[in-house]
């Protein structure tokens, strides 16, 4: 099933590129094209890694770890 998922993701990404990139180049939307390319690359990469059952860390865990000391400080101040 992993190979089928990878092929589908690559096909979808390719279709998006074929449809959207010429429009952006014609309209000279180069900043949007750069942002589109970066987001599509990372989205495709994450989808492929997910289909290969690679452990992907949750960004919310990083945020929780950064703010944990502040939460404890505020809890201590309010008690």
Image: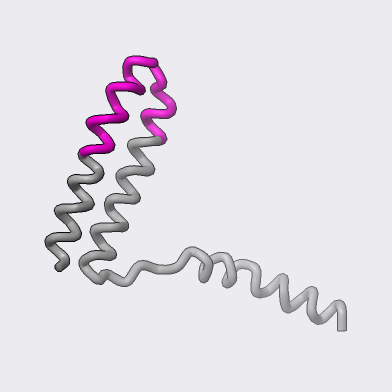
Q: Measured from the top left, where is residue 7 in percent x and y?
A: 14, 53
Q: Measured from the top left, where is residue 76 in percent x and y?
A: 81, 81
Q: Which residues are magenta?
A: 15-35
Magenta stretch, main secondary structure, is: helix
Residue toward you, 9 or 65 = 9
Residue 3 found in image quarter: bottom left
- Residue at x-position 26% and y-position 62%: 49
Residue toward you, 24 or 58 = 24
Residue toward you, 71 or 14 = 14
- Side of 8 where 77 appears, left or right: right
Q: Measured from the top left, where is residue 22 in percent x and y?
A: 28, 22
- Side of 77 where 44 appears, left or right: left
- Residue at x-position 28% and y-position 65%: 50
Q: Is residue 26 above or below residue 66?
A: above
> By what rule are the colours in the image chosen?
one colour
Q: Is residue 60 above or below residue 48?
A: below
The quarter of the image holding the N terminus is bottom left
- Side of 70 where 55 appears, left or right: left
Residue 37 found in image quarter: top left
**Which residue extends farthest left?**
3
**Which residue extends farthest bottom?**
79
Asked whether residue 64 is drawn in magenta, I would say: no
- Residue at x-position 30% and y-position 45%: 41
Q: Is residue 70 above or below residue 28?
A: below
The quarter of the image holding the C terminus is bottom right
Residue toward you, 36 or 74 = 36
Q: Measured from the top left, where is residue 25 in percent x and y?
A: 32, 19
- Residue at x-position 18% and y-position 57%: 6
């Amino acid at each position: 099933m992993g190979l089928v998922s990878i092929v589908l993701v690559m096909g979808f990404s390719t279709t998006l590129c074929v449809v959207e990139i010429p429009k952006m180049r014609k309209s000279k939307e180069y900043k949007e094209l750069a942002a589109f390319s970066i987001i599509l690359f990372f989205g495709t990469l994450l989808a492929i890694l997910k289909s290969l059952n690679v452990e992907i860390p949750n960004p919310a865990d990083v945020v929780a770890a950064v703010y944990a000391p502040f939460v404890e400080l505020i809890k201590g101040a309010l008690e």
